[in-house]
Image (cartoon, rainbow, N blue to C red):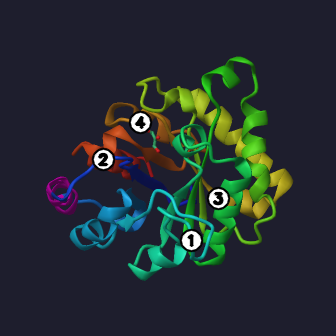
Amino acid sequence: MSRKPFIGGNWKLNGSKKFIAEMSKVFNEAELDSEKVDVCIAPPFVYLETLRNALRKDWIVSAQNCTEKPKGAFTGEISCGMLQDIGIDWVILGHSERRHIYKESHELIGEKTKKALENGLSVIFCIGETREEREKNLTNQVLIEQLAPIKDIPDWTNIVIAYEPVWAIGTGLVATPAQAEEAHLFLRQWFSENISTDVSEKLRIIYGGSVKPQNSTELIKKPNVDGFLVGGASLQPGFVEIVKNVIKNL
Ligand SMILES: O=C(CO)COP(=O)(O)O
């Protein structure tokens, strides 16, 4: 595989200063060839700097969200510029929990993504269908609808696509390697037909949804699965095993 694997740990609403100290120790002591993969941890906003200072420098630290607004009267929001000001240059956007719990629309997520990229941030852009949508055979249509607002992005270098079927998130119901590959292949073809073959070949499409050390090897063996966005298992020392399993399969 010519694409460099990307393995992200999305801590969601979890963590504390104590937890960061403990996990950083585990992560920092892990012997792995980080040149071969991009590894990223996304803690809650208030811990970005604490984690950045504690974590090995060959791993990325990412935010879990940001606003498209540059500044002003937007209580509770965090701007792209603020992230960069504290040395953070990656952000997760469009996570299904933002889409479904906080009702962020496709358009808003598209706007945030464009602003983040314009401001020099790199983006992990999440898409994925609900169980109901899958059962109605709407998976591909939903993915296209979620991608539509970012179709006119001029440069795809700084974006990673995370395919996260909602029914597999936090449920223990992992997509089978075949189901993941089917969706990733569909996405790659969509990029080839709608953006360019060059973008399609270079773009990293990672899988998220109940990834664990035990299922990571079979998933990463699939040719169009370029890594993972891990939730629950990134809060465990076993996250290192997932990274190692990816490296072993290079
Ligand atoms: O939402 C996810 C990562 O962003 C996946 O979460 P789980 O790995 O806990 O299913």
- Cα–Cα span, label 3 and label 4: 21 Å
Q: Position of residue 160 (x, y in %)?
A: 58, 58
Give the mark, 3 or 4, whose residue is nearer the N terminus: 3
Q: Are marks 3 and 4 in contact (CB under 8 Å)?
A: no
Q: How many marks?
A: 4
Task: Look at label 2 and name its amino acid.
Answer: Asn
Estimate how packed mark 2 is, as few (under 14), some (14 to 19) or many (20 or more) residues with alpha carbons within 10 Å: few
Front residue of this view, candidates 18 and 67:
67
Q: CA distance from mark 1 to mark 4?
A: 39 Å
- Secondary-structure class at tag 1: loop
Determine which residue is flagged by label 2. Answer: 14
Residue 232 position by quadrant: top left
Q: Quadrant of the N terminus?
A: bottom right
Answer yes or no: disc 4 within 8 Å of ligand 1: yes
The residue that mark 4 highlights is: 211
- At x 18%, y 53%, the residue is 19
User: In the depicted view, which residue is nearer to us: 245 or 82?
Assistant: 82
Q: Would you place residue 152 above or below residue 12 in this image?
A: below
Which tag, 2 or 3, sits closer to the chain's start?
2
- Residue 59 is left or right of residue 226, and the answer is left
In magenta, the rendered stretch is 18-29
Is residue 60 positioned above or below 193 on the image?
Answer: below
Foreground disc of the pair 1, 2: 1
Looking at marks 1 and 2 on the same chain, the residue that comes earlier in the sequence is marked by 2
Vertical placement of residue 84 versus 15, above or below? below
Question: Mark 1 or 4 closer to N-term?
Answer: 1
Question: What residue is disc 3 on?
Answer: 203
Q: Is residue 89 magenta?
A: no
Distance from Cα at disc 2 to Cα at disc 4: 17 Å
User: Cα distance, mark 1 to mark 2?
Assistant: 28 Å
The residue that disc 1 covers is 73
Q: Amino acid at mark 1?
A: Ala
